[in-house]
Amino acid sequence: MAEKADLRRDLNHAQRTSLQLLDAQKQSSERIRELEDNNHGLREEVANMRAQLSFATGTIINEIQDKVDTATFAGSTVHALKEQVADQTDTIQQLKTYNKRLITEIVRLNSQSKKERKSSKSSKIKKEKPDHHVEPFDADAAATTPSPITATAQAPAHEPSAQVCEPYVITDVMRERLIEDGHLTLSVMVQF
């Protein structure tokens, strides 16, 4: 009988151990299920994060490329604008030089015109004088004849008529004014 009691005790012990193992297996299965669920959720999060990272990387690459393209375009535009400014500066310098030559030529022509007018004025004045009969000079008669003019200040100054002088005086004043006013345009200066 003692053997039966030992066998029963061993059997009870085995049943308890078996029940404990079943409980442990059940808990382990539940824990495995939870871990699998967590693993599945983590995999979905990783997949989402990869998609977001890929999108963000593509966006950043596109933005960088746009900035590089803009900088390249801006650089070429700046270079083209610098060339235009240099060309325009050269053109302005050439125009200034040409303007100086034109002003010098206009001044030269004005002075030449003044000289010609003065010579033509003096010849016109000579032509307008009436012809007087000039008698030969007699020194003895001149010494005995008293002079009606006692001082050079009493002698009448010969002035050309106002009709002859007026246009020339106006033109002279206008030309002198043009030389002083160098800022006038070439078209205005050519009119005179």
Image: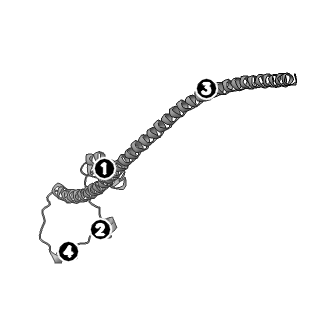
Q: Upstream in the sequence, badge 1 or badge 2?
A: 2
- State which mark lies toward you, 4 or 3: 3
Question: Nearer the N terminus, badge 4 or badge 3?
Answer: 3
| Cβ atoms at labels 1 and 2 below 8 Å apart | no
Q: Residue at x 26, y 48 (%)?
A: 190
Would you say the residues marked 4 and 3 are in contact, meaning their CB atoms lie under 8 Å apart? Answer: no
Residue at disc 3, secondary structure: helix
Q: How many marks?
A: 4
Placement of the N terminus among the 4 image quadrants: top right
Residue ID for mark 4: 142
Q: Kindly report the distance in space between the C-alpha atoms of the residues bearing marks 1 and 4.
A: 43 Å
Residue depth check, mark 3 versus mark 2: number of the one nearer the observer: 3
Name the amino acid type tagged 2: Ile
Q: Marks 1 and 2, Cα distance to the nearest angstrom?
A: 35 Å
Closer to us: mark 1 or mark 4?
Answer: 1
Q: Along the line of sight, which residue is nearer the eye, 131 or 143?
A: 131
At label 3, the amino acid type is His
Q: Earlier in the sequence, mark 3 or mark 1?
A: 3
Badge 4 element: helix
Give residue 40's mark. 3
Contact, mark 1 vs mark 4 (Cβ under 8 Å)? no
Neighbour tally class for label 4: few under 14, some 14-19, many 20 plus, Cα within 10 Å? few
Q: Does 109 appear above or below 67?
A: below
**Residue 120, image quadrant:** bottom left
Mark 1, other Cα within 10 Å: few <14 / some 14–19 / many ≥20: few
Q: Whole-Å distance between the Cαs marked 3 and 1?
A: 107 Å
Going by the image, does 66 lie left or right of 8?
Answer: left
- Of the numbered discs in the image, which one, if any, rests on residue 170? 1
